[in-house]
Structure formats: C-alpha cells, structure tokens
Image: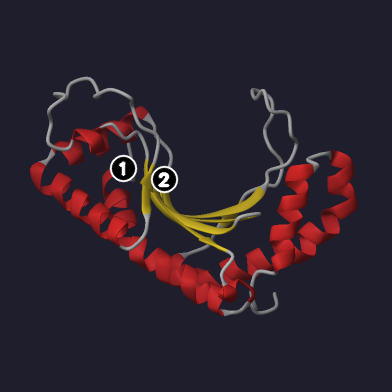
Amino acid sequence: MAPFTGIPIAALDFYEDLEADNSKTWWTAHKHIYDEQVRTPALALFEALEPEFGAAKVFRPYRDVRFSKDKSPYKTHLGGFVETAPGVGYYLQIGAPGVFVAGGYYAHTPQQVARLRAAIDNEVRGDELRRLLDKLTAAGFTVGGDRLKTHPRGYPPDHPRIELLRHKSLTAGREFGCPAWLETPRCKTEVAKAWRTMAPLVEWLSQVVGESG
C-alpha cells in the first residue's frame, strides 16, 4: 500500500452528499469515490498506526437495518477499531464533520459490567479511574458511554463515584473536525498523539473488563 499522505477533503464531501441521498442508486454511482478518497487513505492511515497500536478492523459501510426504523442502507461515516482486549481499544471515525478519535470500553456483557463496577467501587482503583478521566477532560476529551439513568442495583445512590458506576460502557473521545493538517501526513501524527493520550484509560479498562471469563 502507498504511504499515508492525508485524508482528502473529498472524503468529507462524499459523506456530506451521502447524508443527502442515502440510496443504493447514489452509492453505486459514487462508490469509486468511496474506494479512492475514503477507504484507501483510511487503510493507509491505519497501516501507518499499526506498528505502535496494532492492526485495525475497518467496519463495513453497510448498515444492519433488520431491527431499525431507519432503513438507510449506508453508514454516513467510516470507522475503524484497534482492539486491545475484548470490547476495549482505540477508535477512529471519518465523516462529513471531519475526524473523530476515541478510546475505551465499548462492549458490555453482564460479566464485563460487573467487573467494571467492582473496580470503580474499589477506592484505590476507582480513584485511579477518576484521575485518568479528569486528565482527559482537561486535555479536551469528552467522556461518554452507555449509562443507566438511575444508580445500579447493589450500590447506594450516594456512592462517591455513583456517576461512574452508572456506566455500562466507558469511552473518551475528541472531535478534530477538519483541521489544516487533515490532508497532510501530519494527520497520522495527530491521531497517534490523541491515542497516546488515551492510552492510560485504554490500558486501565483492558486490565479490568478485558479479563477472560
């Protein structure tokens, strides 16, 4: 594969147009743009990041509409995930708004949720997680993930880390938008820098929820 040189603005334009006409007819007529301006540069970027972070899985562009009211056939972004433990890892997304990076714990089996909450409940590990998230927030990242609206069963509503205990998944992400470096090799540098910033959180979660069993 050719060396990574940047993400073309044409990739963002492609998804903006797809949002306006998410149909098989439009996709078929413009698939060559997806292949050349979206998928190929994204694969080159993931390949450039692989020596440091590991191989990425690039998700298919087709939506699973079987159980969705929205029957739009195509995803309006390209996403790739580097898994460090089951359900845990680094994420990169390219869409009409630009580039979005994230990292954390995405899957949530009952066993994983139980392990996550047990670690949060532990004073030492729970405070460690809170400090990691505070650092990420201060660095411009947003904490996200699926959360309960109320406190989880078995934990008091006045628990000192009740907000964290509500999480069924836990991520941190940052929207880069469309910066001047997007179309240049510096894009890889900026994504790698963001993933490195998230690495302590990803490592913490890999140890806690990525355990087997």
Would you place residue 181 above or below residue 146 in this image?
below
Residue at 60% x, 71% y: name it: 182
Residue 75: quarter of image: top right
**Label 2 CA crowd tier, 10 Å (few <14, some 14–19, many 20+):** some
**Which residue is painted at 26% across and 53% down in the image?**
133
Amino acid type, residue under disc 1 in the picture: Val
- Disc 1 crowd rating (10 Å Cα; few below 14, some 14-19, many 20+) is many
Quadrant in the rendering for residue 153: top left
- Left of 105 or right of it: where is 79? right
Residue closest to the eye, 194 or 121? 194
Which SS class for mark 1?
helix
Amino acid identity at mark 2: Pro
Badge 1 vs badge 2, beta-carbon distance below 8 Å: yes
Residue 84 in view of the camera: no
The relative height of residue 211 versus residue 140 in the rendered view (above or below) is: above
Image coords of residue 18 (percent x, y): 76, 47
Q: Position of residue 112 (x, y in %)?
A: 32, 35
Q: Which residue is mark 2?
A: 86
Please name the residue that numbered disc 1 is placed on: 209
